[in-house]
Amino acid sequence: MAKYVAKRIGLMFVSFFIIMTICFVLVRLLPNPNVAVVGGMDKQVEAMREAWGYNKPIIVQYGIYLKKVLTEFNWGITTSLAPKYTSVVSIIAQKLPATLLVNLLSIVVSIPLGILFGIYAALKKNKWQDQVISVLIMLLISVPSYVYAFLVQYIFAFKLGWFPLVLKSGTDWLSPEMIHSAILPAMSLSFGTMAGLMRYTRAELTETLTSEYMLLARTKGLTGAQATTRHALRNAMVPILPMILGEIVGILGGSLVIESIFAVPGVGKLYTLSISVRDYDMFLAIAMFYVFIGLSASILTDISYGFIDPRIRMGGGKNNER
Amino acid sequence: MKKRILALILGVVMVASSLTACGKKDSTDSDQGTTAGTTAAGTQSSGSENDSTTTATYTYNDYVSGSPATWNPHEWETNSDAYIMDYTQLGLYSFYLNDAKDGYKIVPGMAAADPEDITATLAGNETYGIPADATEGYAFRIALRQDACWEDGTPITSEDYVYSMQQMLSSEIKNYRASSYYEGQLALANAKNYANNDVAGQPKYESIGSMGYASVDDAVAAGVTDLYIDMEGAWAVTDEDGNNIFSITDENKLRDEAVEEGEEGDYISPKEVYDGYFANGMANAAYQADYIYAQNGVYEATAWENVGLYAEDDYTIVLVLTSPISDFYLYYNLSSNWLVKKDLYEANMTQTGDIKKTTYGTSVDTYMSYGPYKLTEYQVDKQITMEKNDTWFGYSDPAYEGLYQTTKINTQVVETHATALQMFLKGELDNVGLDAEDMETYRTSDFVMYTPESYTSKLTFNCSKEALETLEETAGANINMTMLAYEDFRHAIALSIDRTAFAEQCTATHQPGYGLLNYMYVYDPESGALYRDSELAKQALCEAYGVSDESEITGFDKVQAAALYTKAYNDAIAAGDLKEGDTVQINFHMYKSDDAYKKMFNFIEAGILEAAKGTPFEGKIKLEFVEDPDYYDNAMTGKTGIIFSTWGGSSMDPFGIMQCYVDPTMYHEYGFDHEADLTLTVNGEEITKSWYDWYDALCNGEYKLADVDTRLEILAGFESAYLQTYVCTPMYYRTSASLCSRKVTYATDSYVQLVGFGGIAEMTYNYTDEEWAAYLAENNNQLTY
């Protein structure tokens, strides 16, 4: 197992390096955005680009970049985004808490509810409860999250006044006021995740509930509930867990639209803006942050299979074959 | 097992109860929740309760769509960046509403008095290059306020100005705003060389126009031997290193990214561009002065002491310019400042690549205010808070009495319009922009404020018969597309559309427009006189629309339109351009095919078809909607019938806008002949030039420095004549609308050039923060406007 994990981690860094190289090259190949600058300022911009080394061959630029990253953990500075000429790492660190707050709240709500409703629907398969949940799932999946965002904002914040219209300002992330103001954006984000989990859990559980081993379990004398929780649910979780881990990784990405509607100062906007304004260092730093999280999550997911389902063994050695 | 079931049930109950708890908490905290957006108001109110015996507080709750990236005066780029600067910095001179609130006045800000013109005393100075016979406009002595200080109380002296400018122009820093002080109206003597000290000794290339030559022939006659071409300006190409200046004899090919690789023209040499387009007799020979360059010496290593800004004493600075400047533009350019606080500027300086950069002005800690307000909070993409700067001299100067009632400016970053509107209606914001849908609700509100923009939108016609015939070739049998080449037909279309109804029904806030220039343009900066209000401009429109008084202009006359349709029909039949039974098709290219564009299209189509009733064209005109994101480019190459085009520019320079209508690289009226003759009456004398030459004479040539009345006469004559070519027809003047809160009152309802509605300086409050909170509570946090 340890050998397998070590191998995966090694491969992870190889993948990380390859992706970083591709991202670096592709971003630098984008047209120079400052060509469009008119007036006298374009000379300054061109001079700055020259001084920053943007006119050097890409391979040279990449060498400089790698050296800084590896020796100083210096991922560069912002050249267009606020605050200007500031370390991109510090900006990401400033903005990540808001994204994490909203998205963690969303996960806290959506994962348990999604799984519970999914289980309930599976257990009540083809009954009216299942039909209601299925309709709900279709509704929640087919309507984009920003529609819910506008609706919940209008109803709960504007008309009823139960919540603030936007996220509270400040950095007191765990204060009751801050959490209170994060409920609506979290709620808007959670609908889609919840519906996905409901659908997936229902489908997986329905399949396992009709498996032959469930019949065997019942004939052994287990009650329906015992068989469901001990066997069906555990097996059903094998494909569901990666989905949950994927959701958890996804929360770090933030949501551009939800952040925009509820004025959440998160990383969602940062990522997209960094591309549109060609803030190279910012884009690469965020991209590689997500790549790292994604690759780590995939290793964690693979390892977690072994814990959820003892039949699954890692490493592919002969001893693990069944 | 039962325990597990119980645990499961408990889990469900816990989740459910936590949600319920949230709901209960929200309802009990509803006041807290609804006032959360008005945090400043709330805080101020509670503060005001505590300090009720002292002073009332007035918080202005504003919003912006994005955080400023920097408010370092040396590096700012966008309007968003300028937001904090507008409140926390102050120019040497400031613009305020005049006493009648219908214009602006200029008052000293950081300066103690008006600038003293000392050109005569420096005339002939070789260091600064002031001509020996110069008497005014080159050098100015400015006395500084001795009570001006930074927010921490440190006095601001002339050394601060000198240090700040030295940093601004430093070639080691390469500040974004440096060129504002070495090029253009406020170019300081020797500043350009100083800013280029890092390339000292290298050739300095300048356009032959800026060197005083009108053409290549002039330059050659004056002894210029080596000529160069600006390939970026002339052909939008550079080499791989971004170089744009090449010898006109250079035959090395450059990649033209606008052409697919492998297709003809994918690579082009400077020689080909010059010989084919800019040489004498070629199509763009008229632009030699702009795109043909010559070497004008080399960048000389320049000591800071030779740059045209120095301190005479602790509170007096002297500005020496490279070229004379008029009084207005001196004040105008000095209404923004370049001051930075030395210790913070240097403490936040780091080497970045091969240059130095400072993070001055990117957070509260890296910035020092010196204006009416000081920055107290800044959270990226979320919040900006500014409070009264108690150390600002204005609060103890009687000259500023009655101004700056606002005690705190609480600005949130809100990107989504719907969110901003809801915040406004809950009293959490004190202004909100309105879009087209909002106007259906708020058009009649007393709280709507209209802010004119310098843009005019117009219908632009393709009037080239050849281009229209090319379009017709693929249009099918019995389809005629060449009628737009007939002036009477275009005139008839112009008269078919009710602009007032169009602006009201098809646009959010815009006003019907009849001229090329709207009410934003100031033709005489010294007096602030608006072009559109001048008698000559009014007369120009009356001539163009055939009425005797400006108030009679509607641009809508179905009877005359019908007569013109009939005349155009008969002429076209007689010329063989149209056959009886033909259907006239006009391709109307629009950016998108959404409801708003369709509505505009349908309105115009209905107007044309209605006006054509009873004429030979009845039932024979068909407008074709073409969705075309590249409609501007296609119009410039004659591939469209009609488009909507919009032009605008610096509202302080109405003359420069003429370029948009006569420069072939800019105008969209395909088929318009900018080289055709135009005769205008100037000071009682009839003078004939081509359309382009009139623009050139007015903006670059013999009328550039003419008296204001002469320039006005030329501009008005130009506008009237252009409108009567019917190559385009103005439709509306662009205007944005916003709602102003009941809490505040602006100094004027009418927008005034340069000062708007008076801004924060002259805004007054109808409620203190405490009263406003009470008012909101009374209205259940739901306001109507």
Image (spheres, rainbow, N blue to C red):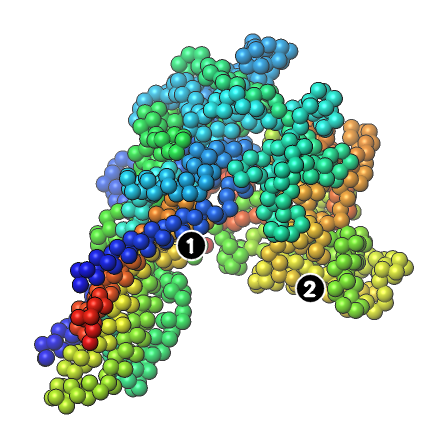
- Label 1, residues with CA under 10 Å away: few <14, some 14-19, many ≥20: some
Question: Which x, y percent locates residue B123?
Answer: 59, 10
Disc 2 versus disc 1: nearer the observer: 2
Question: Which x, y percent locates residue B759?
Answer: 46, 38
User: Between residues B772 and A143, which one lies in front from this camera angle?
Assistant: A143
Residue at the image position 73 percent from the left and 49 percent from the top: B670
Measure how far apart labels 2 and 1 are at the Cα level. 35 Å
Q: Quadrant of residue B465?
A: bottom right
- Label 1: which secondary element: loop
- Answer left or right for B641 relative to A101: right
Quadrant position of the C terminus of chain A in the picture: bottom left
- Label 2: which secondary element: strand
Q: Is residue B9 above or below residue B388?
A: below
Residue B431 in view in this figure: no
Tag 2: residue type?
Glu
Residue contact at pointers 2 and 1, CB within 8 angstroms? no
Q: Which residue is labeled 2 in the image?
A: B624
Question: Which x, y percent locates residue B569?
Answer: 84, 60
Q: Which residue is labeled 1 in the image?
A: B416
Could you tell which of marks 2 and 1 lies nearer the N-terminus?
A: 1
Tag 1: residue type?
Thr
Question: Which x, y percent locates residue B155?
Answer: 34, 20
Q: Output the chain of dot 2.
A: B
Q: Output the chain of dot 1.
A: B
Residue at the image position 57 percent from the left and 62 percent from the top: B594
Q: Quadrant of residue B538?
A: top right
Label tally: 2
Residue at the image position 50 percent from the left and 24 percent from the top: B199
